[in-house]
Every structure is written in C-alpha cells, then in structure tokens.
Image (cartoon, helix red, strand yellow):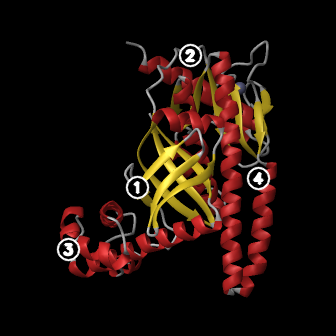
C-alpha cells in the first residue's frame, strides 16, 4: 500500500531563501511552459520537452532533472484538467465556466508543489536532515521534524519522488512510502461508524455487547464546530472589508481550520482503528458517495466543507485499517438513520428529534447516532458474509 508522509522542514533563514528562490524559479518556469503549451496546443510531456527543455534550463537556471520535472508537472496538470473537462466536471460544452477555464493557460503559484527525485533530494532520517538541490547549488543539512513513526516509515519504505511545498511561509516535504500489504484478519463482528455534524463519528456494534467495548462511542464535533463558528463570524466581519490584508488573513484562517480538522480526523481514525484491532472486529463505513448525497439534502452552504471532512475521515480510517490488517467494508448508507436497529422498521417519525431514535413499531429507544452506527455495523457484517461466502 502507498502512504504519504508529510514532514515539516526547519530551514535556517539562508536555507529558506534558497528554497524560496528554487520553488519560485520552478513555478515561474511552469507558468511560462503552461502558457506556451496553451497557445501552441502542445500538451504531451514528450512533445513539450522537445519544445521548451533548453529554454527552461537556461532562462530559469534549473538543473536538468528540475527542468524535466517542471515540464512533466505542466503536462500532468493539463492531463488532469482535460480529464475533468471530459468527465463533465466543469459543465457542459459551451457552459460559461468550462469556456472560462479553457480560455486561459494554467498558472502555478510561487509556492506550488514541485517534485524532487533521488538525484535532487536525499534523506538522512537518522540525522533528520535532507540534502536538496537549489538554484544556488546543492544544500546540505536542512533539518526536518517528524514523529518516530514517520521516521521509521521514511527509513524503511520511502520510494520515488517527494514534493517540496510552501504553505503560509512553512516548508514541507511530502514523501511517498510503499509498504508491503498487511493480510486482513477475519473479523469477529463489525463496528459501524456513523458520520455526522454534532458528533463527527459514532461507533457501535450490531448488537449491544455485555462488556460494552467499543459500543456507542461518540466523537464529539463540539470543538471543531466552535472553531468553524468562530471562523464564520470572522469571515462575516472581514468580507465587508474586502481588502487585500483581510483576504490574506481569511486564507490563513481557512488553512488553520483545515489543519485543525485534519488533526482531529487523524485522532478519531486512530482511536477507531486501534479499538477495532484490539477487539478483533472489522469496520463498516458508509459509502462516501452516499455521504455526499445525504449531506447535500441539508444545509447547502456547509456541504462542501462537511463532505470534504467526511471524505477525509473515511480515507484516514481506510488506510489506518489497511495498515493494521483490520477488515473494512463500505456499506450503502440509505435509511441507516431512520431504520430501527432492533426490529428493522423504517419510518421518518422514528426520529422525534435530531438526537433521539424511538421506534414507533417495537418501542426500542437509543441515541440516534448510536442506532445508525448499529445499522451500519449490521450491514458491514452482511456485506462481509456475502463477499466471503465462497
Ligand atoms: Zn423497532
């Protein structure tokens, strides 16, 4: 399995200046190549390289490898864009949005990610340093921070290119690790994960257990929602101003909020997977497409944020489960919130309010999210049984 490890660089001011000049040169070159590709209608890596390779090296002071990566980056960006157009993600032919996007060449931000291969970047995990090619020459001993787990991964499994990226003045390297697959253990029952807004994730097994292990655990969204609320308030105040500094501040806050949400999602995913591994259970998750549809029915202005956050949490759980050899099943999320986990009766008025589930047929009552998680766990068990019947 592939795993992405992101480490933060701690460059000295001189090192930071060299990194900044390098990333700027690479992205200026990429923007120039992209403009040329756009006017000449040349988009393939090989063709582009024939056109621009020499000039990219000379005009922007890039080494051979860096120049090749710049050209490939542009070709990849256009390939992605054209795939979006083909799949209709930018609207129908002739739609305003599609025409607007296609009319302009792709532009790369000065801090946009740039790939470095092993010839341009070498890692010293023990010393927690990297040596990296810059426009000012090879730079040795650039320090980075990483957890013990990340260091082990980097030392044993790092492969291929790493991306250098600058966000809000902070420097990161994003490395890819290729790990051997862990065999999935046959699960002893399933824990279902219900995703929501008041409670980000609620876990429960299909039936209540005597010991209650891992049953009906709610991971509250209170702190996250408070952060989001503060951010919304700030946005309301700053949007009235619409100055450049207000926009910059908003952007920084948005990223800070995203980092907070990602950290929280990592913590929740780790807890859910650790508990499933400890109890020998599998994990049942709602199918992501379903989550997006379900959320779309509610508050439209918050949809993208929550859908994105749910998607991320699902992704974190899936890869942590794969690493731990925990079985994972995606289930159809239809009616998981309206169906009774005790008798199966489905009715809208089984939900007298947001928090409560009370079955109008058998009288079973439970927290609404726990009831939904139970249904998801039951569907996980069925899904696993069906796919492993042979
Ligand atoms: Zn019932």
Ligand 1 neighbours mark 4 (CB distance < 8 Å): no
- Which SS class for mark 3? helix
In the drawing, does residue 222 fall left or right of residue 335?
Answer: right
Q: Quadrant of the N terminus?
A: top left
Q: Tell me the number on the disc at residue 51.
A: 3
Residue 202 versus residue 59: which sits nearer the camera?
59
Q: Tell me the number on the disc at residue 187.
A: 2
Residue 81 visible to an observer of this rendering: no
- Mark 2 → mark 3, Cα distance in angstroms: 56 Å
User: Does label 2 or label 1 sit earlier along the sequence?
Assistant: 1
Q: Are marks 4 and 2 in contact (CB under 8 Å)?
A: no
Quadrant of ligand 1 in image: top right
Q: Tell me the number on the disc at residue 224.
A: 4
User: Does label 4 or label 2 sit earlier along the sequence?
Assistant: 2
| Residue 343 drawn above or below residue 195 | above
User: Does label 4 or label 1 sit earlier along the sequence?
Assistant: 1
User: Residue, x 63% and y 44% (percent of image)?
Assistant: 146
User: Residue, x 64% and y 29% (percent of image)?
Assistant: 273
Instruction: Give the residue pinned by disc 1.
Output: 120
Badge nearest the viewer, 2 or 1: 1
Residue density around tag 2, few if under 14, some if 14–19, many if 20 or more, within 10 Å: some
- Which SS class for mark 4? helix
- Mark 4 → mark 1, Cα distance in angstroms: 40 Å
Badge nearest the viewer, 4 or 1: 1
Residue density around tag 1, few if under 14, some if 14–19, many if 20 or more, within 10 Å: some
- Which SS class for mark 2? loop
User: Does label 2 or label 3 sit earlier along the sequence?
Assistant: 3
Badge nearest the viewer, 2 or 3: 3
Q: Position of residue 43 (x, y in %)?
A: 24, 68
Ligand 1 neighbours mark 3 (CB distance < 8 Å): no
């Amino acid at each position: 399995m592939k795993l992405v490890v992101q480490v933060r660089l701690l460059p000295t001011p001189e090192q930071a200046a060299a990194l900044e000049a390098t990333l700027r040169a690479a992205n200026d070159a990429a923007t120039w190549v992209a403009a040329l590709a756009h006017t000449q209608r040349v988009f393939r890596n090989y063709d582009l390289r024939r056109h621009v390779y020499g000039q990219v090296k000379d005009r922007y002071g890039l080494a051979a490898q860096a120049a090749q990566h710049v050209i490939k980056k542009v070709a990849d960006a256009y390939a992605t864009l054209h795939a979006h157009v083909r799949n209709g993600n930018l609207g129908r032919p002739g739609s305003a949005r599609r025409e607007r996007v296609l009319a302009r060449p792709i532009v790369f931000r000065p801090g946009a990610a740039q790939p470095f291969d092993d010839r341009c970047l070498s890692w010293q995990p023990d010393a927690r340093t990297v040596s990296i090619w810059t426009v000012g020459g090879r730079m040795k001993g650039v320090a980075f921070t990483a957890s013990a787990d990340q260091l082990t991964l980097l030392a044993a499994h790092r492969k291929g290119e790493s991306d250098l990226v600058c966000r809000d003045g902070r420097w990161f390297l994003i490395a890819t690790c290729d790990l051997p697959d862990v065999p999935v253990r046959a699960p002893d029952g399933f824990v279902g994960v219900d995703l929501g807004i008041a409670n980000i994730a609620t876990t429960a097994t299909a039936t209540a257990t005597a010991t209650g292990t891992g049953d009906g655990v709610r991971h509250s969204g209170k702190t996250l929602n408070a952060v989001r609320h503060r951010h919304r308030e700030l946005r309301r105040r700053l949007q009235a101003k619409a100055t450049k500094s207000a926009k910059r501040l908003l952007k920084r806050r948005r990223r800070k909020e995203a980092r907070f949400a990602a950290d929280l999602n990592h913590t929740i995913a780790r807890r859910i997977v650790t508990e499933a591994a400890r109890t020998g259970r599998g994990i049942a998750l709602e199918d992501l497409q379903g989550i997006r549809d379900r959320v779309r029915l509610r508050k439209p202005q918050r949809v993208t944020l929550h859908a994105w956050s749910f998607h991320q949490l699902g992704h974190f759980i899936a890869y942590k489960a794969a690493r731990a050899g925990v079985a994972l099943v995606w289930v159809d999320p239809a009616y998981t919130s309206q169906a009774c986990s005790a008798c199966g009766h489905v009715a809208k008025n089984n939900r007298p309010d947001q928090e409560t589930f009370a079955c109008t047929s058998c009288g079973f009552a439970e927290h609404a999210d726990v009831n939904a998680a139970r249904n998801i766990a039951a569907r996980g068990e069925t899904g696993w049984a069906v796919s492993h019947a042979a």
